[in-house]
Amino acid sequence: MTPFRLIDTHVHLQMSQFADDQEDVIQRAADAGVTRMIEIGLDVATSRTALALAEQYDQMYAVVGVQPNFIENTEIGWLAEIRAMAAHPKVVAIGEIGLDYYWKKVPREMQEQVFREQLALAAELELPVVIHTRDAHQDTIQVLREAASGPPGIIHSFSGNWDFARDCLDLGFWLSFSGPVTFLKAHDLHDVARRAPIDRILIETDSPYLSPHPWRGKRNEPARVRLVAGSIASLRRVPLADIAETTWTNAEQVFGWHH
C-alpha cells in the first residue's frame, strides 16, 4: 500500500472493456492507493449504472447526466430521471455535460440546449458540474458565462492552452488532468499543469480511455492515475505525495466531502 491516498475523479468502469475483469481493476486501483473513484454517466442508462456501482462499492461515487454525443439516446422525461437520481447521497455532480464539435453526431443547437438545461438543473440542486468540451472551447466558455449559476465544477480531461485555462479558472472551475499530460509533446498541457494554481487542479484517468505513457493506446484503468499525478509532480518539481494529497483535498472541496 502506498503511503498516500489518490483519487480518480473520472472513470467509466461500466464500459464493455471492463466486462471480464471489473473487480480485478477495482482491486488493482486499491492496491495502488486509489481509495476513491468517481463513476461518470453519459446518458440516463449509464447514469443508472454509475449509481448502482456507487451503491455497490464504498470507495465509488457517481456523477449523472447526458454527454453531448449521447443526446440522441435520450427519451421524453430524461431530465426528470437525472433529477431523481441526483437526489441520491452518493451522487456528487451533474455530468458529464457540455459541447463536442469533434464527432459531429448531434447538431450544435441541440447540444447547447441540453447543456443549458443541465446547468440549470445543477444550479437548482446546488451540485457542481463535470464539463466535457472538445473542439468547442470558446462556445463552452460562453455558455458557462451565461448559464452556470450554481456551484462551478470540473473541466474534465483538460486539453486546452493557458488562455482557455485562464478563462475556466476565472469562472471558478477546477482543471482535471488525465493521461495526455504524461505525453512528451503535450507542451500546452505541460504549461498549464505548471502554471495553474495548485488548489485548482485535479487528476483522473477517464478509464478506459487516454492511457498515460507508457501505456498510450492501451486500455486505461484507475491504478494509472498515479502516473498522471507523477507527471504533474515532475512538471511542478514537487513530491508525488504533495500532488496526491492536494488533489484529494481539492476534490473534497469540489464535491463537498468533509471526511
Image (spheres, helix red, strand yellow):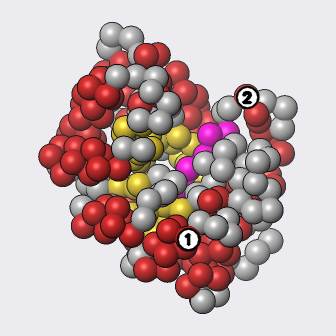
- Secondary structure under the numbered disc 1 in the rendered image: helix
**Horizontal and vertical percent for residue 180?**
62, 59
Residue highlighted by disc 1: 187
Q: Earlier in the sequence, mark 1 or mark 2?
A: 2
Is residue 88 visible in the rendered structure shown here?
no
Q: Does the magenta stretch include residue 12?
A: yes
Residue visible at 52% across and 21% down in the picture: 45
Quadrant of the rendered image containing residue 56: top right
Q: Main secondary structure of the magenta part?
A: strand
- Check if residue 249 falls in the magenta segment: no
Report whether residue 174 is seen: yes
* CA distance separating discs 1 and 2: 32 Å
Count of picture labels: 2
Q: Quadrant of residue 196?
A: bottom left
Residue range (magenta): 7-13
In the rendering, at what x and y percent does residue 95 appear?
Answer: 41, 40
> For this view, does 109 lie left or right of residue 16?
left
- Please give the residue where the numbered disc 2 appears in the rendered image: 16
The percent coordinates of residue 160 (x first, y second) are 44, 59
Of residue 185 and residue 16, the one placed in the foreground of this image is 185
Q: Which residue is drawn at 54% across and 62% down?
A: 177
Camera-side residue of 91 and 236? 236
